[in-house]
Amino acid sequence: MKKVILNGAKGKMGQAIARIIKANPQYNLEVTCGREPGDGLAMPGDIIIDFSSPDGAQDAFNWAKQHKAACLIGTTNLPERFLFQMQEERKIPLFYAPNVSLSVYFFGELLKKANQLYSGYEIGLHEIHHAQKKDAPSGTAKKLAELIDFPQDKISYERIGTVPGTHMAAFSGKYDKITLKHEALDRDLFAASAVQIAAWLVTQPAGFYSMPDFARFVLKKSNKKDVNK
């Protein structure tokens, strides 16, 4: 079993990740330490998973570098200097994505294609998240906007109830309107994907990884299964 250090273990995502790891031994992972940013940590581990805060993410990255462990960061709203620092990493396996859901990644690919097909249409981008979410617009919404060259200050958003995350893009023409939507029904969507990524990341050589890398792995694995049927 690969030892997992869970940074931000008391948060909703941290708790969901711990529960999913425990319920799925096939991933060969076990949470050996749950901590909060700033806590001391002497216990070794194979990978640290961070869903905490920008400062907590930097803390997790520094710990991983010191202990030569893999590092998965899903925390959003990170400073630009830290994003550049991660992209230059070559000594440990490091994964970062503002949204770790594979289905959200594929949704972004759909939006890119739609943006090409409906060239000349007016675009709108809207998101809905739970009332406790601190950043607005979210890191996911900003990434989707970047994919379709949409101004981030034009993203509309709502913070209501316990909504895990809904993102909608509308392409409006003179005579029609096309709406694409991704709706997360449960926070476990993100937690389960984070666990799958972690299980893959600990087997990778040192370097920086993101969702396109994991997506290629999943698609390649799926294609192999289809060939062997």
Image (cartoon, grey):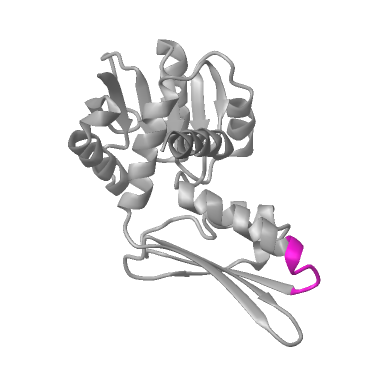
Is residue 25 located in the magenta-colored stretch of the structure? Answer: no
Q: In this view, does 176 lie to the left or right of 60?
A: right
Query: Which residue is located at x 29 percent, y 25 percent?
Result: 4
**Among the 4 quarters of the image, the one containing residue 124:** bottom right
Residue 158 x %, y %: 47, 70
Could you say which is closer to the camera, residue 181 or residue 144? 181
Residue 64 x %, y %: 43, 19
Could you say which is closer to the camera, residue 209 or residue 62? 209
The stretch in magenta equals: 116-121
**Among the 4 quarters of the image, the one containing residue 15:** top left
Query: Which residue is located at x 42 percent, y 41 percent?
Result: 53
Query: Which residue is located at x 74 percent, y 74 percent?
Result: 122
Q: Is residue 8 left or right of residue 206?
A: left
Could you say which is closer to the camera, residue 207 or residue 67? 207
The N terminus appears in which quarter of the rendering?
top left
The C terminus appears in which quarter of the rendering?
top left
Residue 142 x %, y %: 60, 54
Residue 45 x %, y %: 31, 17
Query: Which residue is located at x 31 percent, y 45 percent?
Result: 13
Q: In this view, does 12 lie above or below 218?
A: below
**Among the 4 quarters of the image, the one containing residue 59:** top left
Q: Is residue 61 left or right of residue 110?
A: left
Could you say which is closer to the camera, residue 73 or residue 109? 109
Is residue 119 located in the magenta-colored stretch of the structure? Answer: yes
Residue furthest right as drawn = 120
